[in-house]
Image (tube, grey):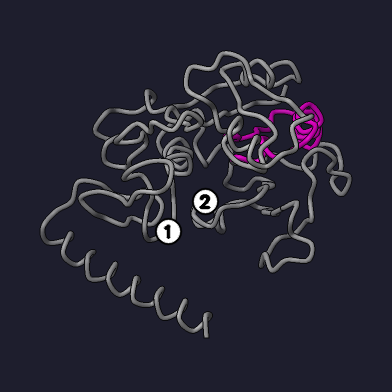
Amino acid sequence: MKTILKKGKRAAEKTLIGASQVYYKLAGNKVECNICHYKANKLKSNSWHAYSSCPNCGSTVRSRLLVAALTMLDEFSENKLIVGKRVLHCAPEEATKRVLKGKPAVYKTGDYLAEGYDYGDIDYNLDITDMKQIGDKSFDCLIACDVLEHVYNLHNGLTEIYRVLDDGGYCILTVPQKDHLDKTYEDLTITDPKERERLFGQDDHMRIFGDDFVDMLAKVGFKVTAVDEKFFDKAIVDKYVLFPPVLSKHPMATNYRKVFFGKKG
């Protein structure tokens, strides 16, 4: 019964979204999702940020910023990093998968929770800190959005990412970062879910990242560029909501999103 009600609710939502798109096509719009091209005067709010989530595909600032970099920045264009390449996508988000579909020569997905769950087309039950299923230099690009805050051994995760990438390959990473925090805060002795949520933002997080994440990547050998909204014209930022329209007051919110492109070798 719950499944039927859920499907009915989603069908009603899709009908409403479809009708709204007819309206905005005629009346004009202020914002547009650069992934599914949903149009509106504003996006919907979530528990972290106001007016920053796409109600159609579920994209958030981090995924739209990533796609903007791949489609608008020559240095990190999808033609250089994705098209015809061997791509490993860890904990893949449906919105981002939509943009990548059909473009890599090889596209593999991995998720630590894949075993025993219905995760669809996940290829590897994968621990990013110990990717024993994957040989050295097996991929040209590895994508992992908001994954590394969940792992116990961060250093192992970074070195494994470096290992599985071929020379000249790229990692594309995002992590939650507390505003204006210089140094990543981690305390692996904290196991209480409520305390983890208070200190790190979620009960399954092991750390909250600071501005030193670039240095962490550089130490394992990556040449790093942190792409944020400043890489784009304001009109593009506003149209595709590449920056939160309203800054969150939550102490653990990531208001200043970045996408980290790390080149190996």
Residue 74 in view (yes/no): no
Is 264 or 20 nearer to us in this picture? 20
Residue 257 in magenta stretch: no
Q: Which residue is drawn at 12% across and 61% down?
A: 26
With respect to residue 112, does 70 lie above or below? above
Label for residue 57? 1
Q: Residues within 10 Å of mark 1 (few under 14, many from 20)?
A: some
Give coordinates of residue 260: x percent, y percent. Answer: 57, 28
Magenta-tinted stretch: 146-175
Give coordinates of residue 262: x percent, y percent. Answer: 63, 26
- Between the C-alphas of marks 1 and 2, the distance is 10 Å
Quadrant in which the C terminus is drawn: top right
With respect to residue 257, does 108 lie above or below? below
Q: Which residue is drawn at 69% across and 39% down?
A: 150
Q: Quadrant of residue 143?
A: top right
Give coordinates of residue 237: x percent, y percent. Answer: 31, 34
Disc 2 is placed on an element classified as helix
Q: Quadrant of residue 170?
A: top right
Disc 1 is placed on an element classified as loop
Give coordinates of residue 248: x percent, y percent. Answer: 38, 33
Label for residue 96? 2
